[in-house]
Structures are given as structure tokens and as C-alpha cells.
Amino acid sequence: MYTIQSDVKEHDEARQGEALMLENEGAKNNGRKLYIESYGCAMNFSDSEIVASIMTDMGFQTTTDYKEADVVFINTCSIRENAEQRVRNRLREFGSAKSRNPGMVVGVLGCMAERLKAKFLEEEKLVDVVVGPDAYRDLPNLIDKVDDGAKAVNVLLSREETYADINPVRLNSNGITAFISIMRGCDNMCSFCVVPFTRGRERSRDAHSIVNEARELFNQGYREVTLLGQNVDSYKWASQDELEKVNFAGLLEMVALVSPDLRVRFSTSHPKDITDEVLYTMAKYENICKYIHLPVQSGNSRILELMNRTYDREWYMERVNSIRRIIPECAISTDVITGFCTETEEEHQDTLSMMDFVKYDFAYMFMYSERPGTLAAKRFTDDIPEEVKKRRLNEVVAKQQQYSHERLLQQVGKVQKVLIEGFSKKSELDYAGRSDQNATVVFPADNNYKPGQYVNVKIERCTTATLIGTICE
Ligand code: SAH
Ligand code: SF4
Ligand code: F3S
């Protein structure tokens, strides 16, 4: 069971007035328990920490056991059909807990809430409250309504909301690594993607609030932050008087300067927007991790055009060449979709040959799943049979396994700087952490070092997904 960091608020003097105002609200809910479960991308996990913050200000305590909770929230993902199916199955399980405890409030948050809106209440009778990603500040009011016996929905999207002033309550935290949301929404219209509909327009968070959050985390003992956005390279913030303008390269530098002992990661980069300026900034600071997640989706220019990714194969290869030139040691990972509308066998081969070109360190690979309301659903037919999508996916996965292993093997015999995150999942005798390039490294625990410290590890061997070594001087 994780503990809530009750000292979080004490660090934030500016919020003490607000805390007083909320005292009455808090008293009403004191002792009520909140359970939150998150699906989907890191952004959703980060949002759950904002929700937990709003709910603890209301007097709730978090629990890791939904069966003892007064309020059960499920923060949902709509990215593929099976992501939504997983949520519906989980709701069934909450349903049986609710039948034993009729007072239990069930809330659906996040992208599926936004996509289905009030329809959710008709489709899933056990749901009491539906809250979209930009409406979490309205939770006190929505919970009130539900307590009065009504059902409640708020799925308004916002052009401004960034929750910049909310101090997230870190959930399931190892106390060493944390996510920081730097922007919300997405203004790209990739034809397969539901995110612009569920998350609304792109907006960037105040750069200083981001740096302050990073500094506060560092002071609490955290040693790694991951800056989150659907397309971090289009981060753009200006002060009200427009005198101060910060782009993503500038923001990276500001966060890197918090401390040389704070590692900085980020996700996701869009191939059309990642600039050499970002790459040079990465090269300049030792603490900006040399790892870029650069989703390719397809290696074929015609498919990329149908996907509305706004780059082609050559552009992507040029970006990879720039990464290799400016940051030779940089690890690169990707996302791939197989069997997008009208994809031919030759076009699929282009994806495989792109993988041969880049030799990705890691990849997330998916079969195309048509999402209602997207451009692709309106314009094209989802015409590649399931078994063809699956076979192409298997080919992509097999190739990636080969390259992932190859990339790890290249590290054997070398020394890696590792941030210790805790004990390995398999054994309390081993520590686990990650290398600069984001590879998991496991090595015998040593009492002289504890989680949160950096150690040099000599890599001795590897499995298909993990580097194994021992601490060296
Ligand atoms: N903003 C990120 C992607 C977020 S979604 C980017 O632009 O790269 C994460 C990944 O899910 C996508 O990169 C894509 O590979 C996959 N994905 C999105 N929609 C999908 C769909 N309809 N079917 C299959 N995979 C999809
Ligand atoms: Fe979706 Fe494209 Fe935006 Fe990524 S950049 S979230 S894939 S629309
Ligand atoms: Fe899923 Fe929404 Fe993230 S659809 S991938 S949770 S932005």
C-alpha cells in the first residue's frame, strides 16, 4: 500500500489560504476513501495524480483496495477498441463490489468519458459520474450532486486548462521518478487517432510552474522527471506581456538547470516537429537523457500521407540521421501501426525496412483499430482483414525483438551510469534502475548505495529486455 505524501501541501505555502477555504468541504468528506485506477498513456497516469490532489483537498484519503472505497474512479483510454473493452470488463468487476456496497460511487474519467459523454450513463448503469480530462476542477460539485442522489456529467473541453497550479499527489510512486505534464491536448489530426477529440486543443503550461514542480520534486528526493505531452516539440509558452517566450528546447534547458543530478526525459516527440535545437540542447546537458521516442507509424510515404502524419519516409530518415549525427549514443524507440486502410504488402515491407534502417532500441506495435469519429473512419474503409493485420504485426514484432536484443548486446562489456529506482521485481537481493538510454539494468544490491543514487554498473550480460551487471567504481 502506498502512502500519500502529507508533506506535499506544506511545501506549497501559496495554497494554504485555499486549504482553509476547503476545510468545510474537507470535513464533509473526512475519512471517505478514494480508489483510482488508470489506463492508457502516461498523461492519464499524470492526470490521476491531479485528480487525487483535488480529492484529497476535499477530504478524501486514497486506498489501493477498491473494495473498501467510497468512491471508485477509473481513468480511461480510447486509443484502440481493446483499450475500451478492458475498461468495460473492469467496470463489471466494480459492479459486483457495488452490489455488495450500494453507497459506492463509480466514476469514469479521461478519454472514454470524453468520447462517450452522457451516453456512458445509459450504456453502463453502474456509473454515477462521467468527467472529461479538462473538467477535474469541477469534481467537488460533481461529487456533491452524486451525494444528493443525481447522476453527474462534465465533459467540457477547455482551451486554457493546464492544471498548472495543482500540486499532484504522487500515486504508486517510487519517490525517485515522476511525470510532469507540460502541455495538454493535440492540434495534429492524424487520421487514425482519437486523441484530438478526447483531449481537445493543444495548450502549453506556464514554463515557470513546470520548473517549480521539477525543483520541488528534486528537493523531495526525486531524481528523474519525464516531461509529458502528445507532441512535446510544439511546446510554446509566452508570458502575458509576451516578453518571455519559451519553446521546447528552452524548456528542456530550464528543467535541466534545476540540478545536474536531476535526470530529464520527455515524451512524445513528433517527427515533423523535432528540431536540431532540441537535439543540440540534449547533447549539451549530461542530465538530459539520450533517449527519444519518435513514433514512425509506417515506413511508407503513401500510408503516412493517408495517416495525415505530414512527414514522409525521407523526412523521417533525415531526422534519424540528424539524431545520430548530433547525439551518436542516443537510443530511439517508436510506435508502429500495421494494416492501416489500403496498406499493401509492399508498403508493409517499407515499415520493415525502416526498422532495418533505424534499428530501434524499443517499439510499441499495434494493429490498426478504427475509432469512431476519426478522419480515417469517415474517409477510408478499414479493409485489411484482421488475420493480415495480425500477421504483419507478428513480422514487425519479430524484427523488433531481434533489434532490441542486438542493441542491448552492444552494451555488454561497457559501463553504464544507472539511477537506482529500487529492488528488482524478481529479487530483493538485486537493485533495478535505468541507464541514460532507458534500458532496465539489474545488479546485486549493495548496502553502500540506496535508491535515488547514481552508480556505475559494468554490464556483463543481457536477456532480451534487461541488462545485467555489477556496480563498479
Ligand atoms: N502523440 C503520440 C501518440 C499517442 S497515441 C504521437 O503522435 O506519436 C500512442 C500510439 O498509439 C500512437 O503512436 C499509435 O501508434 C497508436 N495508435 C493511435 N491510434 C491508433 C489506432 N486507431 N489504432 C492502432 N494504434 C493506434
Ligand atoms: Fe494522435 Fe497524432 Fe496527436 Fe499523436 S500527434 S496524439 S497520434 S493526433
Ligand atoms: Fe489513451 Fe487518452 Fe492517452 S486515448 S493514449 S489515455 S490521451
Image: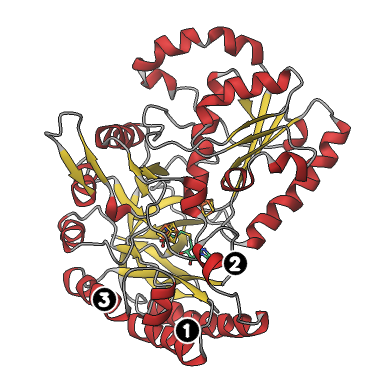
Inspect this view and state whether residue 72 appears.
yes
Residue 90 x, y percent position in the rendering: 74, 49
Kindly identify which numbered label has been placed on residue 315.
3
Q: Write the residue at 51% across / 82% down.
A: 396
Residue 78 in the figure: left or right of residue 242: right
The residues bearing labels 3 and 1 have C-alpha atoms spaced at a distance of: 25 Å
Q: From the top left corner, tell me how far across and down residue 145 is, in percent.
A: 68, 20
Q: Amino acid at mark 1?
A: Gln
Circle 3 Cα neighbour tier, 10 Å, few/some/many (<14 / 14–19 / ≥20): some
271 vs 116, left or right, is: left
Mark before the other along the chain sequence, 1 or 2: 2
Query: Which of the image's four quarters has the C terminus?
Result: bottom left
Q: Quadrant of ligand 2?
A: bottom left
Q: Which residue is mark 2?
A: 370
Residue closer to the observer: 198 or 470: 198
Q: Dot 1: within a 10 Å radius of its alpha carbon, few (fewer than 14), some, or many (20 or more) residues?
A: some
Q: Earlier in the sequence, mark 2 or mark 3?
A: 3
Among the two numbered marks 3 and 1 on one chain, the one whose residue lies closer to the N terminus: 3
Nearer mark to the viewer, of 1 and 2:
2
Q: Which residue is mark 1?
A: 402
Q: Residue at the spot x=57%, y=18% of the render?
A: 58
Q: Residue extending furthest left?
A: 243
